[in-house]
Amino acid sequence: MTRGPHFSESQAALFDFDEAQAEPLAGGTRLPSYIKDHRARLRERFLIGGADALPDYELLELVLFRAIPRRDVKPLARQLLEIFGDFNGVVSAPKARLSEIKGVGDAVITELKIVEASAHRLARSKVINKHVVSSWDALLDYCQTAMAHGDIEQFRVLYLDRKNVLIADEAQARGTVDHVPVYPREVVKRALELNATAMILVHNHPSGDPTPSQADIDMTAQIQMAADTMGITLHDHLVIGKSRELSFRSEGLL
C-alpha cells in the first residue's frame, strides 16, 4: 500500500516562516537541523494530540520558540519549571522575578504574559454573564487561573444580579504577601452602583495554604454586616491557594 505524505512533511510549510529564514548564529552557523527537526516534531504532536500530548516542559518550549527562534530552548524551559514549579507557575510568575533569570529577556516575558492574559480571558468568558450556581466549577477554575499564583494578596468581588448571574468581577485591592486592605463600605457601595443583589468575595493566599486567618474571618463578618444592612446577600468568601480553594460557606464560617 502506498503511504501518503506524513503530517510533518505535508504541513512543513506551515512552520517555515519561523525557521526557514534563520539568520546566522554566532560564528556564522545557522540553526542546527536537529533543533529545527525537534521544533517541527513538537508542533506536530501538539497539533495532533493537543496540550495533553506534551509534558509541561515541552509545552513551555512551544511558547519559548516564538521568543527565541534561533536557539535550543529546552534548557531554559527546564530551568523555569525548576524555579516556578509548573507551567502555570511559569506563565504567572511576576515580571521582576522572570527578568532575574539568565536568558529571559523582554521577548520571553512578553510571550509568557500573552499566554497568561489569554488564559485569564478564556476562563473569565466562561463565567461572566453566566448563572453562578450552574457554572460553579467554571467559577472556581477562573479564580484559580486568575489568582492562585499571585505573589501578593489580591481581593476581588464577584457581583451578582437577582437571578445570581455574574454581572461584574472587580479587583478591589492589592496588598502585601500576607495582607490586603479591604473597606467593607466601599464593597457595598460598589454593589449598589451596579444594582447587584448578591456578592461572592474572593482573595488569594500567596503562601499556598487557603486556611483563613482571623483577620479574614473578621473582615468577612464586617462585610456581611454592611451587606445585610443594605439588603445584599453575601453568598460566599473563597480563599484561593496554590492547588485548592476554601469556601467560607462550606466551612460554616458564613
Image (tube, helix red, strand yellow):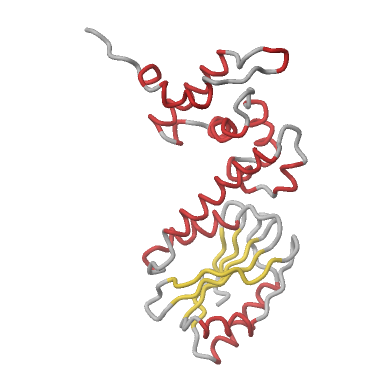
Image: 203 above or below 222 = above
| Residue 10 percent coordinates (x, y) | 35, 19
Measuring 75% from the left and 48% from the top, which residue is drawn there? 96
Q: Toward which corner of the image does residue 74 lie, by quadrant?
A: top right
Measuring 69% from the left and 12% from the top, which residue is drawn there? 28
Name the residue at the top extreme. Answer: 1
* Figure quadrant of the N terminus: top left
The one nearer the camera, 17 or 177, is: 17
Image: 179 above or below 106 = below
Horizontal side, residue 169 vs residue 213: left or right: left
The one nearer the camera, 84 or 7, is: 7
Name the residue at the left extreme. Answer: 1
Picture mark count? 0
* Figure quadrant of the C terminus: bottom right
Measuring 61% from the left and 17% from the top, which residue is drawn there? 31
| Residue 45 percent coordinates (x, y) | 43, 26
| Residue 153 percent coordinates (x, y) | 69, 63
Image: 99 above or below 213 = above
Horizontal side, residue 51 vs residue 144: left or right: left
| Residue 53 percent coordinates (x, y) | 44, 31
